[in-house]
Amino acid sequence: MSKYRQLKDLILRLKARKWSPWWKLPRLCLYIFGIVSYFWYFWCVIGLVIGFLYFIFFQDRGWRRNGLVLAFAIGFINVLVFFYKAYSPLNLVIWSGLGIFLSYTVLLGINSLLKKKTEIISKIKLRIDKKLMRVPRKIGFGLKFMVVLIPIISWSSVNLDFGVMFDNNPRLLWIHAPSNVNIAESFDVTVEAWDAFERLSAVYSGRVQFSLRSYNLTNYSLITNPVAVLPAAYTFTGQLFGSDIAYEIKDGKDNGLHAFSMQIDTPGIHYILVNDSWTQNTYFSNPIIADSYDPSDSRIYWGDIHTHSELSDGTGSAEHSYYYARQIACLDYNALTDHGEIMLFNPFSLDNLETATNNAYEPNEFVTFHGIEWTNVVTGHYICIFSGDSLLKNPVISYLTVPKPQDLWNVLDSFTSQTGARALAFPHHTTKRAYMEDWTYINPKYVKLAEVTSVHGEFLFEQRHELNYRGAIDPPPEYTHGSSIVDAYKMGYRLTLYAASDEHDGHPGHSLSHTRAYIGHQRPYSLWHTRNEHPYPGGISAVYADNLTREGIFSAIEQQRIFGCSDHGRPILDFTINGTRVGDGSTLVVDNQSSHRQLNIFLAQDGAPIGRKHISASVHPNWIPNWNVSLEIIKNGELWDTIQTSSPVTNVTIIDTELITGTSFTPYCVEIDGQWYINQYSDNPIDPSNLNTGGFDFYLVRAVWENGRAAFIGPIWVEYP
């Protein structure tokens, strides 16, 4: 007897079997579990399997139909969430799923009523059954096979990517070193081989050779013979077969990552060049400033202060996130800021987050901050981080328990006064329709920074503004004033720009969701659809801090000594006006309204390949870095000047002789029922005459590369008596 015949006989026997009445409750519970699984991204395949089992093995026609509806619903929902981006995935899953099953329940109820009141339906069914009896067996089997195949194809089309599964071949190298090093002091250089999806390539076995390109610290000319102790040539060791999570392989081989030790003896701005035998290209590190530093001197440290894990709607454990941030993304500091609304329903998650955050903290090596996200859908989201060794857990920062912005400020007041810790709150993705920021509610005591870029896009300007080159997701139906960060500046709010990832894929400091590796089977696995709506690379920020401790990094963030980059790159960007830097209030006081202002911008570029929206970082034969960049000076929310450069290291000075006039948001206010608001989405009435800069000017700098990268610093405010 063939295996097919044996399987068919088994199915027939199971269908014919008389099941115990005790099976009814587990049958119902399993079906409900299948419905719940449609939330679970890749793992909704569980509900798909349950639906097919009911359809294939149950004799009861009603339960067979229920199983088929479950399978089709999951297939449809997956395709809908994948292709329809105008609505957040979680909400789309919830409402579409509820709509399908509520509609199905209503139809069943109507059908039941019709059965009792008329015989017409029964006669129609009888005729259909008779016609179906005449359908040849092979055709009937083919129809059933097609019915089963449609949900499978729907689910597979958006949940399986065989390239992501099996293509782990190396495509390029990424080189990382500290931004500041002492002359003649040993430091680590990390070389990573990345595949087509910016993951470590476990199979990489190329040979690397090192050299140095250096620039003078004062005149930025090329140094011809810098003195340094470079690593010897090295051949990587790897696997025969690839892995989507190569850094978890602990067998002593490199698996796409190796750390080298070196030192630089010549003061300057240096790039480590690594020649790769595999791709036949030479790759540049981030810029490194080698100088003589005192222990009290500030240095640049890079980190990501807005990330998520499986404790809310992210991916991977908290321990995994901190490991990846430190060892793979090579960050100096990181904050896990999971959603309080989700952790509220699992109080143990708060304790787990607190413990993992403290365990991962290693002073002078790697800094972690306790953090949590408050997710109000009306007035905007806030990332909250804390300077101390404990997480605010009572009350849980959730809009369900802390419903209004003023309630949030009151909770932070209470926590900081009781513990002595400090707190900061950061608005982000401010122009999105679903979570638009209402700037009129912010508290300057806690809100000192604004997140300008993340996996959601860029928010310096409204998404349709001509100066928003990169765009963002989920725009409101029409251009909306009052939501962008520049609009907040025009209202008079003094916030400094920073960048973060807001990653949900388990990769702080280097999110992969802009590549095809957002797919559900990419490890670490996710139970959430949030990867679907994150098409941009995630950003990171640099702080000028006195030391690498919680106190040192938190103080630097609090004092606004920070700048951001839109991806994993680490350029060095500095901006001053008459010697006043960004940070410590970022305010220059001049003598009078006509005082001249000398703007100075320093940029040392990062030559690493980068990704863009929906595009992985890539190179080609004979690839060289694209050094073409525009330095934009944005004054009072308008593009004031642009400097083009193609030099890796640039220092420019511009004099502004125009009168200091300030700017105002007032013309964009809207009147509703006799009261004024910043836009139609705000519920907080304001006095338009208060929404201005007080007659003072603000300046910020945005570096815009041809290859898609962007970096941000500022603003600096200019006042006069």
Image: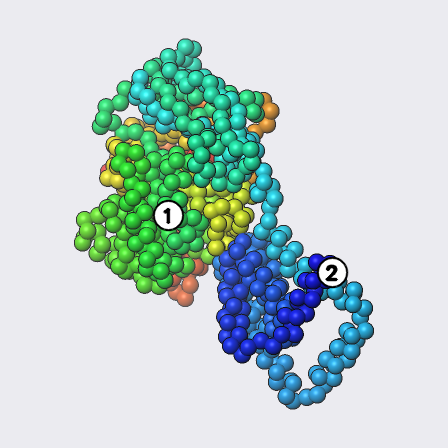
Name the amino acid, label 1. Answer: Ala
| Residue 601 versus residue 458 in the image, above or below | above
Q: Nearer the viewer, residue 309 or 382?
A: 309
The reply to whether dot 1 and dot 2 touch (C-beta < 8 Å) is: no
Residue located at (81% from left, 68% from top): 136
Q: Tag 1's secondary structure?
A: helix
Instruction: Bin the neighbour count of mark 1 within 10 Å (Cα to Cα): few under 14, some 14-19, many 20 and up.
Output: many
- Name the residue carrying label 1: 318
Which colour assignment does the render follow? rainbow
- Name the residue carrying label 2: 1
Instruction: From the top left corner, tell me how far across and down residue 282 is, in percent.
Output: 52, 22
Instruction: From the top left corner, tell me how far across and down residue 10 is, in percent.
Output: 66, 66
Q: Is any atom of residue 553 visible in this view? A: no
Q: Nearer the viewer, residue 685 or 58?
A: 58
Residue located at (35% from left, 19% from top): 263
Query: Could you tell me how far apart the alpha carbons at marks 1 and 2 are, in whole angstroms?
Result: 53 Å
Locate the N terminus and report the quarter of the image it occupies.
Answer: bottom right
Which image quarter: residue 178? top left
Instruction: From the top left corner, tell me how far across and down residue 33 is, in percent.
Output: 50, 66
Q: Tag 2's secondary structure?
A: loop
Instruction: Bin the neighbour count of mark 2 within 10 Å (Cα to Cα): few under 14, some 14-19, many 20 and up.
Output: few
Instruction: From the top left corner, tell me how far across and down residue 234 is, in percent.
Output: 47, 21
Q: Earlier in the sequence, mark 1 or mark 2?
A: 2
- Left or right, 23 with reference to 641: right
Q: Nearer the viewer, residue 617 or 507?
A: 507
Residue located at (64% from left, 85% from top): 114
Residue located at (37% from left, 12% from top): 227
Which residue is outermost to the top? 225
| Residue 505 versus residue 674 in the image, above or below | above
| Residue 639 versus residue 98 in the image, above or below | above
Name the amino acid, label 2. Answer: Met
Locate the C terminus and report the quarter of the image it occupies.
Answer: top left
